[in-house]
Image (tube, coloured by chain):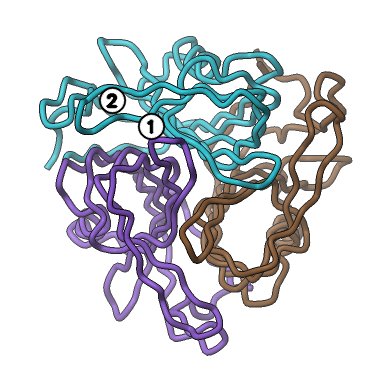
Chain colours: A purple, B cyan, C brown
Amino acid sequence: MHSYRFSPGPIHLLRIERDADLYQEISRFASEYGITAATVSFLGAVQCAALRYYDQETRRYHDFAIEHPLEVVSGVGNVTLLDGEPFLHIHAAFTDEFGRGHGGHVNAGTVVFAIEVTIQELEGDAPVRLPDLASGLSLWGPAAP
Amino acid sequence: MHSYRFSPGPIHLLRIERDADLYQEISRFASEYGITAATVSFLGAVQCAALRYYDQETRRYHDFAIEHPLEVVSGVGNVTLLDGEPFLHIHAAFTDEFGRGHGGHVNAGTVVFAIEVTIQELEGDAPVRLPDLASGLSLWGPAAP
Amino acid sequence: MHSYRFSPGPIHLLRIERDADLYQEISRFASEYGITAATVSFLGAVQCAALRYYDQETRRYHDFAIEHPLEVVSGVGNVTLLDGEPFLHIHAAFTDEFGRGHGGHVNAGTVVFAIEVTIQELEGDAPVRLPDLASGLSLWGPAAP
């Protein structure tokens, strides 16, 4: 296990407006405010969702879209560093008009209807994403203990 | 985008007891403690769920109920101000005895079996919900930047 | 309702590695660092999931497994005390390759592919889990108000 210790920094609430891109808006906020380490949660509704599922065998993302309105019932993620820049990683659970559950890794292309985000800044050395051979993903590199 | 900056305040854990109303109990706690800005998360189990799905076209809530016990696998939300009073907004992902996902906007009428809540108070100017023409919802009004 | 008030303590990010046990790794971290009160969230992917659904009538856990890879779209929980030791309670929403929602109470036996965890330590008197007659569960005992 790799672990990283922080002091709690400022907390931000964001309201993302209709027709904005969910992923890009949170990502842009982190970049503009120079946020290099944070945890993220969000809820609300989207007009459609652009999602990914990682195939653990082929080590490729399978991209798919849900082309109708959805409630965002629970979104979580974080901001850390990739190639020296703030990088946002978010997943979310969605539900449709019948109350059925959907979701995945949230990609650019998810169009907001109304979204409320909480960003908890983390004060300390930001974890850095590096290529991980065991998974094929970019994961946080060495730290304590 | 509208954004609001806070310092982290006290954090509360709540245990909500059997037969209580999930929405009303968290809401009552915020009112009694004078909490005007907070983020909320919760998990546990409910006896039944009273949920809503917002129809983005007709701009009306479609209310529905799930009339059997459910695990609450991830609930998220916030407290901000509406009409000068603390207002709770929560969504949740639920699962049934077959492990299938359900969920939506959580309404009064969701009956607790056992629920554990985390409330993170936010110190700073509480966002105020105002009518938003683009969505038909009450959303946070102007702030920085 | 039982409520417990804390000051925000240190926040940890954990990266749990491939083939580790999701429940046991977070639990072990809490024990090693002497964390007796915390809130937890996580996301990522697992190779399989060992889940539980609590039957509210018979008061028994029904254990079940999902024997294929899943995205973890939103995991939440907490650490408090049971029998004098840190005890981890986590639930999670998962999705499969078709984007369908699953989930439940997360048990030992859930095998990690890649998981990222946030642990927010709570400074104050840790809640203690005691047998609760109304539910048959171990729930937090008396505190204010």
- Numbered-mark total: 2
Please report contact status of discs 1 and 2: CB closer than 8 Å, yes or no. yes
Residue at 43%, 42% in the rendered image: A95
Asked whether C59 or B86 is in front, the reply is C59
Residue C86 percent across, percent down from the top left: 77, 47
**Chain of residue at mark 1:** B
Residue C74 percent across, percent down from the top left: 52, 51
Residue at 22%, 51% in the rendered image: A111
Distance (Cα) linking label 1 and label 2? 8 Å
The amino acid on which the numbered mark 2 sits, given as a three-letter code, is: Ala
Asked whether A30 or B58 is in front, the reply is B58
Residue C12 visible: no
Image quadrant occupied by the C terminus of chain C: top right
* Residue C110 marker: none
Q: Is residue A26 left or right of residue B78?
A: left
What is the crowding at mark 1: few (fewer than 14 residues within 10 Å), some, or many (at least 20)?
A: many
**SS at circle 2:** loop
